[in-house]
Amino acid sequence: MADGSSFYITTPIFYVNDVPHIGHAYTEVAADVLARWHRQAGERTWSLTGTDEHGQKILRTATANGVTPKEWADKLVAEAWKPLLETVDIANDDFIRTTDERHERNVQRFLQKLYDDGHIYTGEYEGYYCVGCEEYKQQSELVDGTGEYAGQLVCAIHSKPVELLHEKNYFFRMSAFADRLLALYEEQPGFVQPESARNEVVSFVRSGLSDLSISRSTFDWGVKVPWDESHVVYVWFDALLNYVTAVGYGEDDEEFARRWPAHHLVGKDILRFHAVIWPAMLMAAGLEVPRGVFGHGWLLVGGEKMSKSKLTGIAPEQITSTFGSDAFRYYFLRAISFGQDGSFSWEDLSARYQAELANGFGNLASRVIAMVNRYFEGAVPAAVAPTDVDLAIAEVERRATDASWEAIDRFAIHEAIAAVWELVDALNGYITEQEPWALAKDPANRERLETVLATAYHGVGTLAVLLSPVLPKATAKLWTALGAPGSVQEQRIDRAHEWTVGERVGTLEALFPRIEAGE
């Protein structure tokens, strides 16, 4: 189904001015689940994440903390951003930092090419600049300040005052690419997803594109402009290029050809950078545009977007220390329609953990393994004479396999998990109706008992394969208990229902232990 094709997925590179919150972890987990799913479908998969370390905001944060920007970035990467990947169990292939030499060198190479080809000119610019966004703001994106900022214009996103800047800068002729961008959105309707994000981008470009100021001369923390070292490259122009510098742009043509183009997963607040500026930059350089840009929603806490400045930032380990990384991964991708905003609440997390993970999936797996041990001394039974109800379970396994893969192909992660959960529910219903514990009381029902437990055992194995991208720790334990060959991550997920059964089961501790109130 998917053999031989290539799937390259990126997260945004995250700003190291502060530590990560669950909004960052949500993006990481979504990209990781997509990468694991495609990898298990036999695709040549590459998953990239990293950190954005240049710009005025980092310089100011470092200065305020009495260290150099590089020292600040090194500390945050080592103590916060790389540990995040372990906290939520991310299996990324590469981690890029914009201070990496491989990145800085090839940003300069890219910029020089655009300059040589006439896409960059010198100009003057005056405008309102938000350091938080690292972006010049239109009047429509500003609001009147209140409280301590009364009488000042503030950024609508950060609620902090903007600065009026006047600079001689280098400009990228982005306006020249408006028609080509509109043609791209027209010819590839799925280039920007979901639909609401696409509509926003199209109307933004239709309303007219300005040229983009791509250098700054008022501070020096950034990549030097190669033909004028008194300027550094605008942080967004620098940051976007990580997606190509990480896979060999400028120095390893073979690697670049193997990996590029990528699918970009971004929060909707940085959609325009990725869906407008980035493809225009690539067009100017004569490179392929990305395969697509998916703008997911925000995590809301008490109705407010997750952010450190508004004190709604929850550290991922506050959740994983109690519920574990699997439950974190499951909850955010199951409870929120991918692409929409989603509200986080401890009550909802706790309720889903108990009902869906502990009782729904975990208890099912434990019961089936325990019954094979109890009634067959651990030997995996074979179906003797399957009836329509047994064959119906096999059909649900096939349907869950196909439907989940089809949903993943559309980036509809929540739909993929829902499709798999139909099998969880079907198996729980099947065991309740077939009552293997009652069948076991009469030796005359031995063959029927074998068929029922063989059917349930096979269904649970299919679940282990289908849920392995979402619940890597629990499914690895379950796979061992099933006595199945190899590791669960080696199984073809697009043919999950065809997994090879084992000969003997092991024992299985509760995959999702009860969590007492107050833990």
Image (cartoon, rainbow, N blue to C red):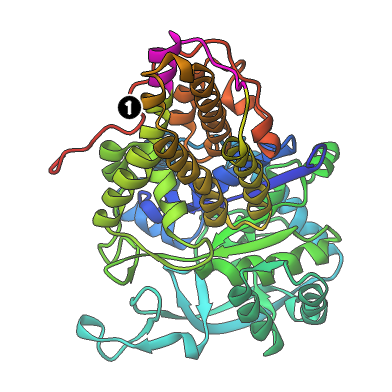
Image quadrant holding the N terminus, namely top right
Q: Residue at x 41, y 56 (%)?
A: 23
Q: Residue at x 51, y 27 (%)?
A: 452
Q: Is residue 378 magenta?
A: yes
Horizontal side of residue 507 vs 230, given as left or right: left
Horizontal side of residue 73 vs 107, given as left or right: left
Vertical placement of 414 versus 207: above or below? above
The kind of residue on which mark 1 rests is Ala
Image quadrant holding the C terminus, namely top left
Q: Nearer the viewer, residue 345 or 124?
A: 345
Horizontal side of residue 207 vs 196, given as left or right: right
- Give the residues drawn in magenta, as a range: 369-384
Badge 1 is on which residue? 510
Quadrant of the image occupied by residue 215: bottom right
Extreme-left residue of the structure: 518
Q: Nearer the viewer, residue 295 or 129?
A: 295
Q: Is residue 87 visible?
A: no
Vertical placement of 234 versus 89: above or below? below
Q: Position of residue 128 (x, y in %)?
A: 47, 82
